[in-house]
Amino acid sequence: MAEGSHPDSVVIVGAGQGGYQTAASLREHGYRGRLVLIDAEDELPYEKPPLSKAYLKGEADEAQLWLRPVGYYARQSIELVAGSVTAVDPAARTVRLADGSEYEYGHLVLATGATPRTLGVPGAGLRGVHTLRTAQDAAALRTSLGAARNAVVVGAGFIGLEFAAAARRAGCEVTVVEALDRPLARVVSARTAEHFTRLHRREGSRLVFGQGVAALHGDERGAVAAVELADGARLPADLVLAGIGVIPRTGLAAAAGLRVSGGIVVDARLLTSDPHISAIGDCAAFPQVRSGNRLRLESVQNAVGHAELVAARLTGESRGYRELPWFWSDQFATTVQIAGLDEGHDTEVVLGEDPDAFSVLLFRGGELQAVESVNRPTDHLASRQLLDRGVPLNPAEAAAPGFTLREHLASHRGEPAVPVG
């Protein structure tokens, strides 16, 4: 975008990490036009990862979740609007809210995020059945957790397992029910999944694999009391968390005539099929830099990276999104950190002999795709640099005795490896 062609106003729909970061980065890049940040939650923009971690465990309060205190938005002339956007009019370049108010935009950023899937079984509406996506969800769940004795988690993804860990720490009897044959089946290797199975069982949780939920049963007060599995078994439950994934919020985009396919379709610059509208974060389906495959990523890193790119583009810099994906999860005393994206590997190399501290290197066609590091932060930092810089590494090199990611990275820089510890 040439100098002088900056939009005179930017409206951002969604005040999650991506929406907030877009507004903050625009001001950091010197944007001086009108800036409106709209969200259906009447809350200051806040961090979401702690909702299933520190906040749920009572180690953080609402104010500690805020991305910025209230005074920041006034100082930066960022208008915070609480309300639900019901329509986008690309021809008039306006958004309409449920209360009838309208906002004009020079450029629109859709950071609408995603909504959690709910259990489509009888009894799903009983009291004590939860999802976890918003601060309101987390507050309700934390209250329920304080009185619960038997918690059933449906879905062994990151959210489900993080909650299971928090529930065990709170003294609940916990059962995790997963329809697939292992936890985190869609996001980590079998070796890493096996570690988390052992971890949760060692901490006292029961894990049930290969089973779906047929129904939820309540008591005379309308509260959940049991979970019925597909095989007819019943699990006692006074708290149920559905951690079965999310659905991208694409309704506004579709109704506005934008292209939608597995998310709001954007190009490498995060522009939709309308040049005056961008989409970022969990709702955006964008081309992955290595494979070219269009996908969505649900991570803070991705939302922040998208936001920073859009802010740079709207203030004069044009480039494609090329950031390396990375993710993390904390469960009990274990941290898993993932660098890169596994879109189907054919070879694995494991570094480390300790069953509770190792890294799994995932290769496809002899090329490193991703690295999963369990309690090995040095490996994670090195792997991010290796993948980001395209440093070559093949499975035979990685499997050689004494190999370390840190030394391999240093050898390609022409530098000595720095000892750890």
Image (spheres, rainbow, N blue to C red):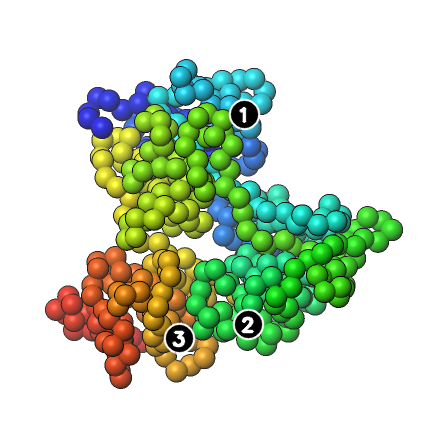
**What's the mark number on residue 358?**
3
User: In whole angstroms, how far apart are the C-alphas of marks 2 and 1?
Assistant: 43 Å
Residue at horizontal 42%, vertical 29%? Answer: 258
Quadrant location of residue 371?
A: bottom left
Q: Is residue 19 left or right of residue 198?
A: left
Front residue of 240/29: it is 240
Q: Which residue occupies 84% across, 53% down?
A: 219
- The mark that comes first in sequence, 2 or 1, is 1
The reply to whether discs 3 and 1 touch (Cβ–Cβ < 8 Å) is no
Disc 1: which residue: 86
The answer to whether residue 134 of the structure is visible from this angle is yes
Q: Amino acid at mark 3?
A: Phe
The amino acid marked with disc number 1 is: Thr
**Direction top: furthest residue:** 92
**In the image, residue 58 above or below residue 383:** above
Q: Nearer the viewer, mark 3 or mark 2?
A: 2
Q: Is residue 359 left or right of residue 248?
A: left
Most foreground residue, 319 or 366: 366
